[in-house]
Amino acid sequence: EPEVTQTPSHQVTQMGQEVILRCVPISNHLYFYWYRQILGQKVEFLVSFYNNEISEKSEIFDDQFSVERPDGSNFTLKIRSTKLEDSAMYFCASSEASTSGLAYEQYFGPGTRLTVT
Amino acid sequence: AQSVTQLDSQVPVFEEAPVELRCNYSSSVSVYLFWYVQYPNQGLQLLLKYLSGSTLVKGINGFEAEFNKSQTSFHLRKPSVHISDTAEYFCASISGGYNKLIFGAGTRLAVHP
């Protein structure tokens, strides 16, 4: 069964450093997402990406964040200058596009735990 | 604004007992509803979804949920739980023409022998 994969599983970085979290979505999916879950809190939407551009982003997704699909398979989240409060589990997800253009069922990867020290 | 409320943060239950995890949503437009399960140290797995049609939806692992528009609820049920059902359960919704998932705070289901 196809699945979303994420690397690394755990990333430790120092405050102010740049990190890149990587995801390989399911191959025939067209919508890509990043979510995060701070320890003990709910899962929060960060950004959605379709047709090589951001389709929606949350207030959390400020100028420190960026996403990219550098090739036909990878989808990355970059945090330019990490802060302590960026410590969280980051989930990548992907979904097909429905005939109406609205994607429904999102498949999640196992997550990358980011620890900023 | 769209929101999802899970009324119970923790639900302890004995093995083979029935369980109901409650979820209420807030949306003035058409809504699509989902239940995801997160096992310890793992990602989110889709249990079931309501998009349209029958209000009773069945998912994996013997779970089912009922969409109730008048009560704006989408409660998750299982008639007989197993130890292996111990996990965090998240209710989520999509609405308003966007495709971002809005999650509830989660309910930790603890199944005891």
Image: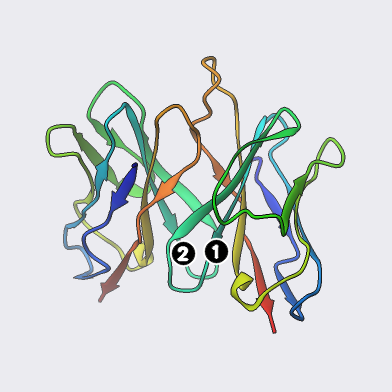
Query: Do pointers 1 and 2 mark residues of a single chain?
Result: yes
Report the chain holding disc 2: B
Name the residue: 55% across, 58% down: B43
Q: Which residue lies under the disc numbered 2?
A: B39
Q: Position of residue B92 (x, y in %)?
A: 38, 46
Residue situated furthest right in the rendering = A71
Going 22% across and 29% down the picture, which residue do you hit? B55
- SS state under label 2: loop
Which residue occupies the foreground of this view, B19 or B72? Answer: B72
Name the secondary structure under disc 1.
loop
Label 1: few (<14), some (14–19) or many (≥20) C-alpha neighbours in 10 Å: few
According to the picture, the residue beneath numbered tag 1 turns out to be B42
Q: Is residue B113 left or right of residue B87?
A: left
The residue sitting at the front extreme is A63
What's the chain of the residue with tag 1? Answer: B
In the rendered image, the vertical position of residue A92 relative to residue B58, given as above or below: below
Residue type at numbered disc 1: Gln
Image position of A105 (left or right of B20): right
In the image, residue B49 above or below residue A22:
above
Residue situated furthest top in the rendering: A99
* Displayed quadrant of residue A64: bottom right
From the viewer's side, name the closer residue of A7 and A86. A86
Q: Quadrant of the C terminus of chain B?
A: bottom left
Q: Is residue A49 above or below residue B16?
A: above
Q: Residue furthest bottom?
A: A117
Kind of residue at disc 2? Tyr
